[in-house]
Amino acid sequence: MRRRSLRPLLDALCLLAAFLLALLARFRFATATINVQWYWISLGLFAGVDISYLYLRGMYDNGHVTADRTGVMVDGLVYATFLYLLVAYLVKNTLFSRLTLVYFLVLSFVLQVALERAVVGIRRRRYAHGTDLVPTVVAGSVDDLASAGLDALSLQRELGMRLLQTEGEVVTVGSFAQLEVTLADGTAHAVLLASPLPDTSQMVELCLRRYVTVYALGGTVRTLPYPSDVLFVGHTPVLRVRDLLVVGVGARIKRLMDVLLASAGVVILSPLLLILAVLVKLTSRGPVLFGHQRLGEGGKPIRVYKFRSMVVDAEARLQDMLADDPFLRVEYEATYKLRDDPRITLLGRWLRRTSLDELPQLFNVLAGDLSLVGPRPIVADEIARYGPVAAVILRVRPGLTGLWQVSGRSDLDYAERVRLDMDYITHWSLWLDIRILAATIPAVLRRRGAR
């Protein structure tokens, strides 16, 4: 069993110990006068909510000492208490002793904080012994690190950094180009910005695009639109640049929502999926599904599936058509679509107008290639047209639907689609996802922009 999987179990044991101690303090284990079954049900409810919340807040992620997480543990107990009180009210069961509840909450907090302190202490001890360190490259001057009172040993012990060295000298980079070369071999997993540099913004974006953690001394990233967590190495503050995209608790809830809704969709729509598969097979020669290669999260190639709506040799016909008709080529290169596409079958035209051809993408959602809501999946040939924003869009899992689909779908020009995808990423929230999902069905029923 990995250490990562032990932490939820240890938190559960803390809650169990707090529960038993609370019963001892309140009843001396003389439980004949209480509803023992309800007490154990209450413990299960508390533990389930508390541990789920800690998971969603990243307490169980493999990672390095970041900041004081006492507040997260307090929040977990508060949410667990609130849900318990709500359930007790709804089932009209108030048999849990209030004094026992107070004992339990206080003891749970003390034991969980003690566990967190022990985990941090063990992790720092492992850092001191050179275990679990993150290879880190310095951007800027080592002298600026020394001026801030930092050295390789203190960074190792407090933040788990191992400054990369060559021939006994710390590896440093002074420009975006140098950093790009240094990160290309995949050795460095973190970058420490020690000095203000002219192209700091591009360097941070490069790191975030490659999932490289960015740390910075105060003053080096103050002009960037990125929030930061403040960590301390001794008395010196170090900023850890925090991603603005779909990460942390929100990302976990978003993924949970994807799995639950997509699973429900597959079950409910399974008769329709079967009927459409049979119709596609009977009305034209070729496979039922068509898999189109797109770029997924991180630029990874993914295959997005649809019910086949074109003839089998559609790609070869497209190249012949574009070679013969320059006006058609201009239309295709503008939107990567053709308004009157002769390759589409009769059934395929109806499937596209109703968007039923996209139902197999529910399986892409379950596989984790797509999210229910997200930016439009990009074809590799399109990426050059996105310019600098491609680095941002490719760091978010593409969606089955999104802002551009509910705002006009294929009727929007290319620049407007890109802008809407960026608006979605910049203003993302779970509530926005819910609103887009709710707006998708009317947009599909109106068939606005579909083709």
Image (cartoon, helix red, strand yellow):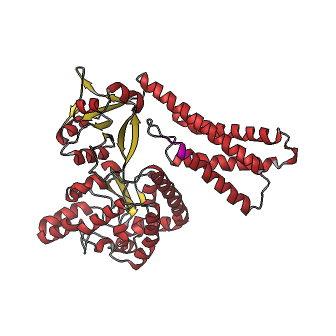
* Residue 69 x, y percent position in the rendering: 51, 42
Image side of residue 73 versus residue 328, left or right: right
Pick the quarter of the image with the C terminus. bottom left
- Front-most of residues 138 and 294: 138
- Front-most of residues 310 and 204: 204
Which residue is depicted at the point 40% across and 36% down? Answer: 232
Pick the quarter of the image with the N terminus. top right
Which residue is depicted at the point 31% across and 40% down? Answer: 216
Image side of residue 278 versus residue 264, left or right: left
* Residue 136 x, y percent position in the rendering: 31, 32
Q: State whether the magenta stretch is mostly helix, strand or loop.
A: helix
Figure label count: 0
Which residue is depicted at the point 36% across and 67% down? Answer: 403
Q: For residue 191, which quarter of the picture?
A: top left
Image side of residue 72 versus residue 156, left or right: right
136 drawn magenta: no
* Residue 352 x, y percent position in the rendering: 36, 71
Image side of residue 246 versus residue 19, left or right: left
- Front-most of residues 288 and 362: 362
- Front-most of residues 197 and 178: 197
223 over 146 or under it: above or below = below
Q: Which residues are magenta?
A: 68-72
Q: Residue furthest bottom?
A: 446
97 over 282 or under it: above or below = above
Q: Residue furthest right?
A: 32
Residue 277 can be seen in this image: no
Q: For residue 321, which quarter of the picture?
A: bottom left
71 drawn magenta: yes
Residue 124 can be seen in this image: yes
* Residue 237 x, y percent position in the rendering: 37, 38
